[in-house]
Image (cartoon, rainbow, N blue to C red):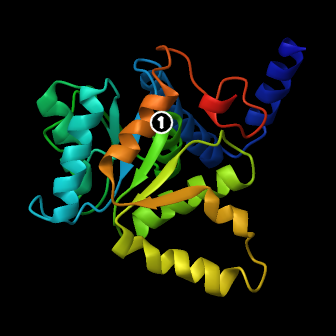
Amino acid sequence: MNELNAENAKKFFESLEEADKERAQAYARDLGRGLKIVRTFPQGVTVFGSARLSQENIYCKKARELGRLLAENGHAVITGGGPGIMEAANRGSFEYGGRSIGFNITLNHEQHPNPYLTDMLQFEYFFARKVMLAMSAKVYVFFPGGFGTMDEFTEILILMQEGKMPKMPIFLFGKSFWKPLDKFYTTKMQPLKLINKDDQKIYKITDDIQEIVRAANKIGHPKIKTNYYDGFNKATTPHSS
């Protein structure tokens, strides 16, 4: 059966136009390099947030504190590898001596690797980078950010909502920033039945760094080379299965 599938895949690939073959190979390279590095560390905590905030911003200070506490408790810290919130979280982990991973991406502006990375991989494609940011983690933390952060949040949210990935803790850090979005979901989307009330239970809004660390500690430390995606066929929380 595997040989038959491989032969069919080869025939399908050969039927593509040359430009599409090149594109598919480029996608595969980005994904393959990412999948390889993901297996070199236990799933940790992925921290998302703006690249544009100063390190003196209160949210960056909190992200740095979170990175340090996660490292103290043995959790790898994963970010998009850039400045702002990402740099702060990586720095907190790096300064403690923890595993500090950055999945960076080539952009026309503002996205250069921060200097607090123990591991770094440069991506060409947003979708491949987002796959790795998701697969690397057992907990997701979203600090304030712009369109990129919102894109990352809503993609993980819909994947969990539809059972396309394991249900893991999602924290939105900063009540004053995230509460208006939560209110929009409640007052605008729910009355039109665009979402269910339970959909808002997928994430939690918090101002408590320790709450995030406790959630990571509760799940524990999966072994290197294992992944909660392996054999996944239904949405279950890792520590409750």
Residue closest to the eye, 199 or 223: 199
The kind of residue on which mark 1 rests is: Ala
Q: Horizontal and vertical percent for residue 64?
A: 19, 47
- Find disc 1 in the rendering and name its residue: 137
The percent coordinates of residue 158 (x first, y second) are 66, 58
Q: Nearer the viewer, residue 25 or 130?
A: 130
12 relative position to 237: left or right: right
Q: Residue at x 26, y 44 (%)?
A: 66
Left or right of 203, for residue 5: right
Where is residue 23 shown, x and y percent of the image?
57, 45
Q: Quadrant of residue 190?
A: bottom right
Residue 241: percent from the left, percent from the top?
A: 70, 28
Identify the residue shown where x is 84% and y is 14%. Answer: 2
- Regarding residue 83, the answer to whether it shows in the image is no
Q: For the residue carrying disc 1, how many other residues have a C-alpha within 10 Å: few (<14), some (14-19), or many (20+)? A: many
Q: Is residue 36 left or right of residue 116?
A: right
User: Residue 7 vs residue 41: left or right?
Assistant: right
Q: Nearer the viewer, residue 165 or 213?
A: 213
